[in-house]
Image (spheres, helix red, strand yellow):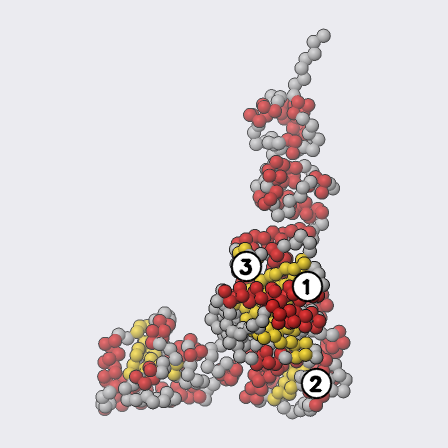
Amino acid sequence: MFYLYATSSDFTLQNGLIKLGSTIHPVHRMRAYNTGDAPGIGLEKRYLGIWQVNAKSRRELLSIERRLHNKFANLRKKKRTEWFNVTIDDVAAFLNSQPYVVRQLTIEEVNVIQAKSELPPSSQDIDEIKYETEFIAERDTELTSNITLKQKFFDTFLPGKAPRRIQDELWDLFETICHDDALLENIYKGIVQWPTGTGKTIAMLMMIVLAKERCVRNGTIYRGLLVSPKNDIFKTICSDFNKLSEFGIDLYDGSDGKLSRITVPTNRHIVVMACPQSLLIDATGMKNLPVMTHVHYDEVHRITGELYFRLLKDMLIQWKTQFLTGTSATPKTSSPEQHRKLAELFGDPHVLIHRCEVDEAVRKGWIATPRFTVCTMPKKDTGAYAKAVALALKRTIQKKKDANLWRGGKVIVYLPTVAAAKAAAAEAIRCIPDATVYLATDGERTDKEFVDAIADGTIRILFACERYREGSDIPGLEMTAVLIGDSISAYILIQIQGRALRTDYAGKEGWCLVVSPCEEGETEQDVLDRTALDILTFIGDARPLVKKDFEKYVETYFGDVEVGGIIISKEETVARVQAAYVRREYAKKTPKERYHSIRKLNAEMGIRSKTEYFARAGEHPNFIEDPKAYFLESWVSWYDFLGVDCSSFPPTKADWVIACKGRGLISRTDYQQKRDSTLPENPSEMYEDFTNWDKEIGVEDEIVW
């Protein structure tokens, strides 16, 4: 039989450590017990629990053991050890819920095994001891020598942690791609779309390692080019990329102008980091690089510069590049130019190698809960904007503190110009005296001090323009804020909001304060509706959005929000944003399309008369005061406009008059009392040429001379 076990000693239990392993003979496993890397363990070792498992071979037992270890990988004492900082209750709860566990041995059975292990082995135990010893040796070989490339990758880049579902899936998907010769007859193009904070760096490294292994199998040299629009991103990821040496890949950092000073070898597996500006230089840029097997573009929604874009397209052909990959939280873009470049490079629609939704990332605890909050101000000069931003910051920080959601203390504020950033910083110093203010603008940079500062809850505010908008991962960042204009680039808002989604602590909410000028008569609620609608339609796919989409996105990005001192529920926000969406979509239609759109809506609302239409004006999302004049060219009748089924009614007024007289209906009273379903309830709303009851069906009095 096959077993999993949990064992410890008084010493290791005091330190919160339990050893989790597998065995064929629990008695002899305890006799052959190896204390491994748990210091101070004494002779008082004992089983805390033993579980019989349904395995058919020693190999299958080792596979089941790996599942147990992966479950608690984040609590592992150190890499490749069997000691974990877990409780026996947590282990038991997990194993007793697994289908491969047959049963947990009783306390009495465990005590018997423990007692037998303390006795010397008899001559009858020799075969069992030999079999268990062979298994222990096989297990140790499995742990140390027979490590797959996938295991080595995650051990290197995620030491002591279990890979996330999306990371595990991406490895399998891209490994399959790298083994598909037919798929790779031409350049393979694809994008990984994961929310900020879920590990896009791991995705890049994964694709580089797997593409390199394909080159090794084919007897060729791997050369990768990693492109990013910002040098700051390279500074964030460089330490991880240096670990590629574990896989025989050398890193050449060409960021910050260093590309001109490096010589790229042609006989080694390498990755070159560079920004588009450096790659454009004729003598030392892209044209001077050797053939690149793999080009990866980080933040692929920002393919900067037409000259660079054209050169990259030409070089991909010239190099006969095998892989063109990209990563982004939002490859979809509201910029027509960026969409064109993305489509020309990656195709339209582009291939998504793997996608992770924000709501899953929040649910799994991979990122903090994203929250947008909105503040408005009248349209005035820069000075007024600076004051409004500072005051909005003060209120929002206090609101986050009051909600017990303030731990790290860091805030980044993005302004459109250097002058605006400096003005807002000066106002913040004045109205938030307990805050430390930093700048990340040309000529005045104190941002390194901001990044390096301890995240202890002290209010630290960095004012910036473009810097730190993408690719940064700053511990203790509680919220971001941005001043936007009349229109909004939703993908920029998503990127900015993503900066605060690092999970520094359980229950964290990454807030993004949107400060927006408003038109005369526009309220904070109007701006919230506008902002939410832009974000939600941007996040959504090409299909029309329905109520469940709005419910999902509002729950993920907004929740209950405070507007003008009033708490607005998720349900109310869903209703308002959905109504705004209907109005926006309606505005895109032709007059004829609008007519049929409202006609369908009237029917869905069950409106049966002109009187009811006006009575329900307040709840009608597309109410029109005078629809007959508005739809003059499409107008048929009120019944047609209301979507009333007229198939059983006489088609013309003349036919209706004949039908009424044939049934002896000669007055309005007769009609209302004796009408059946083949006659309209309100003929004046069915027939446009209807005049009045007496004239249409009344009997003329006989004239006596």
Reply above or below: 543 against 167. above
Foreground residue among 390 and 351:
390
Mark sitting earlier along the chain (2/1): 2
- Label 2, on which residue? 257
Cα–Cα span, label 2 and label 1: 39 Å
Q: Circle 2 sits in a helix, a strand or a loop, which is it?
A: loop
Image coordinates for residue 84, horizontal then vertical, percent: 39, 81
Pick whichever of labels 3 and 1 is earlier in the sequence.
1
Can residue 416 be seen at all in this image of the molecule?
yes
Q: Nearer the viewer, residue 110 or 506?
A: 506
* Residue 682 picture location, percent across and down: 62, 31
- Residue 683's label in the rendered image is none
Helix or strand or loop: what does disc 1 sit on?
helix
Residue 305 lies in quadrant: bottom right
Residue holding disc 1:
384
Dot 1 crowding, Cα within 10 Å, few <14, some 14–19, many 20+? some
Type of residue at label 2? Gly
The reply to whether the C-beta atoms of the residues labelled 3 and 2 are less than 8 Å apart is no
Residue at image point 58% right, 62% down: 373
Q: Amino acid at mark 1?
A: Ala
Q: Nearer the viewer, residue 628 or 435?
A: 435
Does residue 344 appear in the picture of this structure? no
Q: Which mark is residue 561?
A: 3
The quadrant holding residue 523 is bottom right
The answer to whether marks 3 and 1 mark residues whose Cβ atoms lie closer than 8 Å is: no
Task: Name the residue: 44% across, 78% down.
Answer: 74
Q: Relative to 679, is 699 above or below? A: above
Q: Position of residue 679 (x, y in %)?
A: 60, 30
Identify the amino acid type marked 3.
Answer: Val
